Amino acid sequence: MHIGDIEIRYLDGGGFRLDGGAMFGVVPKVFWEKKSPPDERNRIQMRANSLLVHAQRKTIVIETGNGTKWDAKNRDIYAIQDGDSLVESLAKHGVQPRDVDLVINTHLHFDHAGGNTRFENSRAVPTFPRARYVVQRAELAHAATPSERDRASYFPDNFQPVTDAGLWDLTEGDQQILPGVSVARIPGHNADIQAVLLTGGGKTLAFVADLLPTRHHIPLPWIMAYDLYPMQTLETKRNWIARMVKENWIVVFGHDPEIAAAMLHERDGKIEIEPVDLNR
């Protein structure tokens, strides 16, 4: 699809599973299991949703998914999909890793930045060797020294090789990256997660990652137990969802395995979704 002069295509960053209770926090299982049925290990199906964007003569990848650098134990724990879903999706659109000019990470958890790097001769190297990588400066600093609460979400092999190669372009707060491409902080899941906004032709698309990991997280109190600052998530959701509805934004969910993008409409005090096909 197009937003003004910006071309947008959906990319599959790989399927995986996470604990349903962790994904829905204080919401009782009797409610969430009707929407996201768990497997025998209480895990629900997830997908690492990513975008391919062509803007200002640049080829941009937003989020890089799970990547391929998984040992057998963790691949089993998270039910990581085999293969390199992101690179395969790019190839379907005629794009090779060397063609990418810019990679934007919302944050550096493994399911959003795993494809930043790949193994080459048993060593992690940037997957996109010509690209500049974008993330919040404070997020990169936190990833290097995470707390006990979120240490399991950060794998140094996903970001340290980018640092070693000198490929980071670090943001600080809300910032324009290119005309029509900007980032904005959406704190709650962690302190420095950023949304990516694409604007043009009177339209806006917002990639909001873990602010709304799935369409089932639209109700305000449906907040992940993974979030470091859930009350901040609540206020960020309250403000952003109101704006999404009022301004008719297209919203990209970070992990919905069935509906990657939608428009939100308010009817009788409830938010309804209208799915959007990004590849039309």
Image (spheres, rainbow, N blue to C red):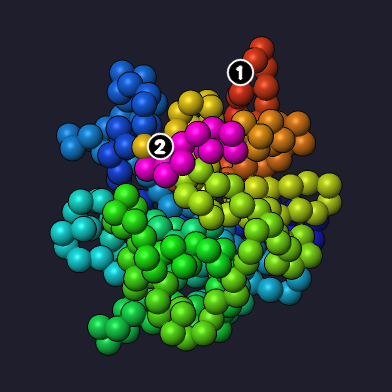
Q: Which mark is residue 123?
A: none
Q: Earlier in the sequence, mark 2 or mark 1?
A: 2
Q: In the rendering, at what x and y percent does residue 190 appear?
A: 47, 49
Q: In the rendering, at what x and y percent does residue 12 appear?
A: 46, 56
For the point 71% across and 61% down, which residue is it? 175
Q: Along the line of sight, which residue is nearer the eye, 27 or 125?
A: 27
Which segment is the magenta one? Answer: 226-237
Inspect the image, locate mark 2, and give the three-letter code of the amino acid beneath it.
Met
Q: Is residue 153 above or below residue 132?
A: above
Name the main secondary structure of what is drawn in magenta: helix
CB atoms at circles 2 and 1 under 8 Å apart?
no
- SS class of the residue under badge 2? loop
In the image, taking residue 141 as reference, residue 169 lies left or right, namely right
For the point 52% across and 26% down, which residue is it? 219
Name the residue that disc number 1 marks: 270
Q: In the rendering, at what x and y percent does residue 67 appear?
A: 37, 65
For the point 70% across and 67% down, which residue is it? 177
Q: Is residue 56 above or below residue 225?
A: below
Q: Residue furthest top?
A: 268
For the point 21% across and 58% down, which residue is it? 74
Q: Along the line of sight, which residue is nearer the eye, 2 or 142?
A: 142
In the image, taking residue 119 as reference, residue 91 lies left or right, namely right
Q: Is residue 9 above or below residue 177?
A: above
Q: Residues within 10 Å of mark 1 (few under 14, many from 20)?
A: few
Question: Does any portion of residue 230 appear in the rendered image?
Answer: yes
The Cα–Cα distance between marks 2 and 1, rounded to whole angstroms, is 20 Å
Name the residue that disc number 2 marks: 224
Inspect the image, locate mark 1, and give the three-letter code of the amino acid beneath it.
Lys
Q: Along the line of sight, which residue is nearer the eye, 246 or 234?
A: 234
